[in-house]
Amino acid sequence: MHSSSAQQRYNRRVLWLAIAYATLLLPTAYLLKLQLVSGPLAVLLAALPAIPFCGFFWMMGRYLSEETDEYVRMVQVRLLLAVTGLLLAAMTLWGFLELFGFVPHIAASWWPVLWVVGCSTAACIQRLRARTDQ
């Protein structure tokens, strides 16, 4: 399956965002865990890794607007809706189980990570299925 130029641009952008995320997350976690910063600076530092991560969502929207193949765009939209729906259902279920003390708390920052992993996994499965259909 050939990647469109929109897909290639998306992959490049997401790679740079992933590098920025890791570059910001690791020192932030280190500095905050050891309590080397505090106050407003600590709050700002804690929020920094969210910026490139939120870029993942922005880049997905940008990719969908740049993709010229209507079928590919429709397949991607279906994939995103399926993963988003499954994750929202899982979050709802977990939230109620957590509320009543049956499961431990999960930090909200993990849910978008699971969304990205779910989208990546679904895209890999989709690509494998497309290869076997040929």
Image: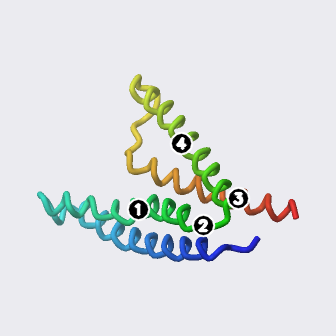
Question: Disc 3 versus disc 4: distance between alpha carbons?
Answer: 24 Å
Query: What is the quadrant of the C terminus in the image?
Result: bottom right
N-term mark: 3 or 1: 1
Q: Nearer the viewer, mark 4 or mark 2?
A: 2
Left or right of residue 84: residue 130: right
Residue kind at label 2, given as amino acid type: Glu
Front-lying residue, 107 or 5: 5
User: Callout 4: helix, strand or loop?
Assistant: helix
Crowdedness near tag 2: few (<14), some (14–19) or many (≥20) residues, C-alpha within 10 Å: some
Q: What amino acid is labelled 1 in the image?
A: Phe
Count of labels in the image: 4
Camera-side mark, 2 or 1: 2
Q: Which mark is residue 67?
A: 2
When asked about the image quadrant of residue 33, the answer is: bottom left
> What secondary structure is marked by label 3?
helix
Mark toward the viewer: 3 or 1: 3
Quarter assignment of residue 126: bottom right
Q: Residue at x 58, y 51 (%)?
A: 80
**Residue pointed to by mark 1:** 53
C-alpha gap between disc 4 and disc 1: 17 Å
